[in-house]
Image (spheres, helix red, strand yellow):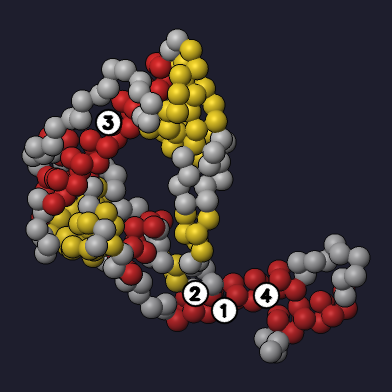
Amino acid sequence: MSTATATPAPTRVRKGMTFRSVHGDSNALWEVIGSAGRGVWHCVIVNEPMEINGKVYDGDYAGVTDVFTSDRILTAVRSDLLFADLARRDKEEADAFPAGTAVHGEAGRNRWIRGTVVDTPDGKKIRCEALVGDWQPHELPRRHADGSVGQGGFHAKAVATGDLRPLAPRTIYESGSDRYADWPAPTAMDPVDLTVPPMTAEEEVRAAKVRRCIAIGTAVRDAQSADFDVDAALAKVAAIVAGTDA
């Protein structure tokens, strides 16, 4: 349970007050620099330098000015404070999970990612270790018609690589949220098998044929081009069909 308290919202605009508001393609940080009349204020975008590949660049819109009403500024400030308070609450609740704790993060109705809490310089995270619950076949590793193996969906790949994900307490079963009161407990579920079985002899024969079909498609892919070498392509196709292509 979080003990964080909401930050009181200001009721008046003052010089030096900052807030965020969209400008162009940026959620820019604005600063109030002076009055422009009753209930209207001059504001300027604050420079927020960013580092890219070791080089520091100024913000795209730093120094741009505009006018805002008091209502618009105060509404933006209240929104900023709301999200800041939510972030503080989430961090406090995440910090309540000791490193090494086994947890289950929700990824949809009765679909969970089982993992272990780890401490990182960026805060508590979950090391993805298994999928449990009702996952669909297309979300899991599977063999394609040509015999190659697909890694599955985003979450299956995260388990395969042991990805670290931010610990979001509101999506953790062990947080005790009432939201999960009538859901089956993931703690008792067996992990989903993410291994792909080897092909049978029949499947290997079919996969080889599929690969040949793909190769034929590649050979004739540019047949509509003016400079397409028809004879060379047909020779390539014949070799593929005969199984004598390199």
Residue topped by disc 4: 215
Viewer-closest of 72 and 187? 72
Q: Which mark is residue 147?
A: 2
Q: In this view, which residue lies farthest toward the top?
A: 38
- Disc 2 marks a residue whose amino acid type is Gly
Q: Which secondary structure, mark 1?
A: helix
Q: Mark 4 or 3 closer to N-term? A: 3
Q: Earlier in the sequence, mark 1 or mark 4?
A: 1
Spatial distance from mark 1 to mark 4, Cα to Cα? 11 Å
* Above or below 167: residue 149: below
Q: Secondary structure at mark 4?
A: helix
Earlier sequence position, callout 1 versus callout 2: 2
Alpha carbon distance from label 4 to label 3? 57 Å
* Of callouts 2 and 4, the N-terminal one: 2
Find residue 90 and report its horizontal and vertical position in percent.
Answer: 20, 43
**In this figure, which residue is indicated by the disc labeled 1?**
208
